[in-house]
Image: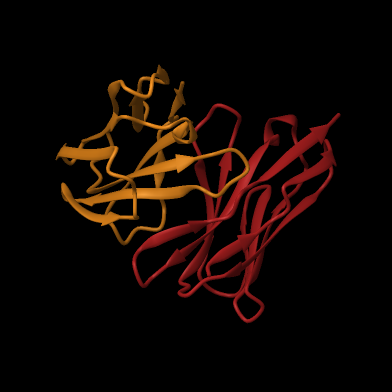
Amino acid sequence: GQSLEQPSEVTAVEGAIVQINCTYQTSGFYGLSWYQQHDGGAPTFLSYNALDGLEETGRFSSFLSRSDSYGYLLLQELQMKDSASYFCAVWEDSNYQLIWGAGTKLIIKP
Amino acid sequence: ETGVTQTPRHLVMGMTNKKSLKCEQHLGHNAMYWYKQSAKKPLELMFVYSLEERVENNSVPSRFSPECPNSSHLFLHLHTLQPEDSALYLCASSPDRSSYEQYFGPGTRLTVT
């Protein structure tokens, strides 16, 4: 079957760095995406990795290792507004669909 | 203006009711999607429309009926739902079906009583 595994909840302190891991097992793979969703809000696109390595966008970075079927989202200089759920999703090229993880709730403490 | 809008934001309906969810995108995209989001579960893709033509129906019960009258509007018609259908229903759009970046609306919180 197809599955993405990510921790259900992560807690961190304001100003710190946190890493949210995602491992995947899918029949097809073209790239790994990350989305952010605040409570009551819409999921919003954060990043996409099709090749191995680290992609940096401001305070957020995303990493992919295709050989390990693994990726992570790295959030630096955490701010209270980063409290949200973060979803990893595999983009399947076979049928142009996103296969989603169950999400990681990030709790930030002052 | 918000890229993808959904109405209503909240809906409570009985199992014998008929209701419709509406989605509108102002981004000029050609693909639109319906997802179901339940607590602590992955988003479930329900339907995909590309250029107003349904291209995916992921084994969704017939009590859910989508309609895409044009590339900017998407509806989800609901009838004789079950309590387990209570969830957040999200609409999304993308430039085309092969685009991995999707733009979501805020969702309709549906409660079936």
The residue depicted at 58 percent of the width and 54 percent of the height is A101
Which quarter of the picture shows residue A65?
Answer: bottom right
**Residue at x 66% of width, y 56% of height:** A61
* Picture residue at 54% right of the left edge, 74% below the top: A51
Q: Could you tell me residue B59's position as x and y percent?
A: 34, 54
**B110 over A57 or under it: above or below:** above
Position of residue B54 measured from the top left corner of the image (x, y, whole percent): 20, 52
Instruction: Give residue A22's position: percent from left, percent from top.
Output: 66, 61
Q: Most extreme residue toward the left, as rendered?
A: B69
Residue B1 visible in the shown view: no
Task: Between residue A7 and residue A15, name the one nearer to us.
Answer: A7
Q: Which chain is red?
A: A
Q: Residue at x 45, y 29 (%)?
A: B106
Left or right of B22? Residue A7 is right
B60 or A54, nearer to the observer: B60
Residue B113 seen from this side: yes
Q: Tell me the quarter of the picture where residue B110 sits.
A: top left
Q: How many marks?
A: 0
Residue B70, by quadrant, is top left
Chain in orange, by letter, is B
- In the image, taking residue A83 as reference, residue B76 lies left or right, namely left
Report the side of A67 relative to B109 (left or right): right
Residue A23 versus residue A109: which sits nearer the camera?
A23
Quadrant where the image shows the C terminus of chain A:
top right
Tell me if A23 is positioned left or right of B55 in this view.
right
**Viewer-proximal residue, B83 or B28?**
B83
Q: Is residue A99 above or below residue A94?
A: above
Q: How is the image coloured?
A: by chain
